[in-house]
Image: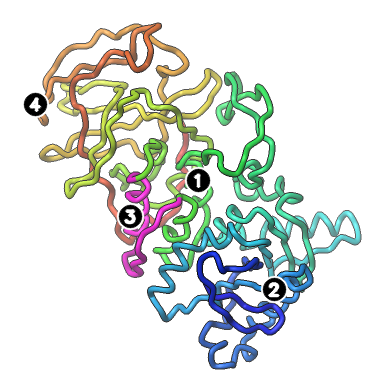
Amino acid sequence: MWLINTTTLEFREFFGLDVPEYAILSHRWGSDEATFQDFERGVQQTREGFTKIEKFCNEALKSGIGWAWVDTCCIDKKSSAELTEAINSMYEWYRRAWVCYVYLADVLWEQSTSDSSQTSLKRFRRSAWFTRGWTLQELIAPQNIRFFGCGWQFLGTKDGLADEISEITGIDSHHLLPNAYIREAGACISALNCRGHPSQERHWPSNNPLPSIATRMSWMSTRQTTRVEDMAYCLLGIFDVNMPLLYGEGPKAFMRLQLEIIKQSNDDSIFAWAGNRFSGGLLAPWPSSFVVSRFVQKRAPLETRRRPYAMTNQGVHFPITWRAGELRTESEVRELRVILDCGICGPQGFKNLMLRFEPRSGNSWYRICTQVLEQMDIGPWGHPLLRSQSLLTQDPVTLNNFTAMLAYNKGQPRAQADPLNVLKEITVEAGRARVGNEYLIELYPRVV
């Protein structure tokens, strides 16, 4: 890890436990930034971006910090190995920083009158920094963030501006502030976007379980990056995964990211997305597909011995624990509805989400009705039902007996519920990742 001495502005490389306390900079890149090679050749002062580095180091020095890190000049981007290491480590570097300085060059802060303060706050809300992909981890990872506007005028801290930042980004304040107090969720009887009524306060330590995958994906849903692949690479730290960088692969990078996530997580909410009519795979084609997933919550599995997902050359082997429908044969259109171990709180309590599938050629299936995020009309969590009257049939595709069950017997434990002894799993097309307007156009689907 290369660091800049805040006094001499000279580089030094550190490894492992030898890394000293340092300040880190978050900013939007300009058109003439000083690079690692500029510092090596001693021509960094000819770049417009050098002034930003110099003033950042001065601010760090005022706080008694002897070292600093800036992404424009502390990475040798001509070395693919160093670039890969930096991107895979960047979330951790921001998390370990003593302080993170956020420089908003497009925000001029005026506090002389109440009107000027309101104008300044509007500028803060409109800052392009909140629309960029890489700045998401730079907002989430550091605990201590200080915001500066044009001319390095101090604007405030992440703690002090948490409510405004939450409104701008859609990230709940208790995810922004690891040491904030939150409330445990109780029974929900309120609006569709309710996340549970408060029952008691408790401390939320920084090592507590993270929000659902769908919720974290929603934070990225309205952000953009210059390179298509960076829409995936900037999320590596958010999901604590590592993977090689393959610039040139386009939207396939986001598909690879999701496959890496499901290798180490059993959170069904990664499938809780809504896309457009071109999306027929199990995985989302683009982060914007999660724009409606902010309030999706993960729940304990409905079946305690659930089988894991598996990726094959035919698609994703998707285990089926609970069904919400049947195979329709009257119109020769066979549809399978599968309940996910995640859902959304609504007026009638927590309701699980479900996916719809139809068979393709061979033994593969594909997802249908991807334009909406569907909730169960009546779900097994809040409202257990008696066993439904189901007809034993045979699926002509897999030749497996299939019994449709709506839910388990009332009063039975979930783990002892009626077994669904057919179609243990299906192979679903992972997704189509190609560059084109059908995937890159941002759509705004709805929850039903």
Q: Nearer the viewer, mark 2 or mark 4?
A: 2
Measured as percent of width and height from the top left, residue 332 is found at 15, 26
Which is nearer the N-term, disc 2 or disc 3?
2
- The amino acid type of the residue labelled 3 equals Arg
Q: Amino acid at mark 2?
A: Gly
**Which residue is label 3 attached to?**
256
| Amino acid beneath label 4 | Leu
Distance between the Cα atoms at labels 1 and 4?
39 Å
* Cα distance in 3D space between marks 4 and 3: 32 Å
Disc 1 and disc 2 in contact, CB within 8 angstroms: no
Residue 298 image position (x, y, % from top left) = 46, 32
Q: Residue at x 44, y 18 (%)?
A: 381
Q: CA separation, marks 1 and 3? A: 17 Å
Tell me the magenta residue range: 240-263
Which disc is residue 399 wearing?
A: 4
Q: Sequence order check: which comes first, mark 1 or mark 4?
A: 1
Marks 2/4: CA distance?
A: 69 Å
* Residue plotted at (37% across, 47% down): 261
Q: Which residue is mark 1?
A: 216
Q: Is residue 262 magenta?
A: yes
| Picture quarter with the C terminus | top left
- The residue most toward the right is 113
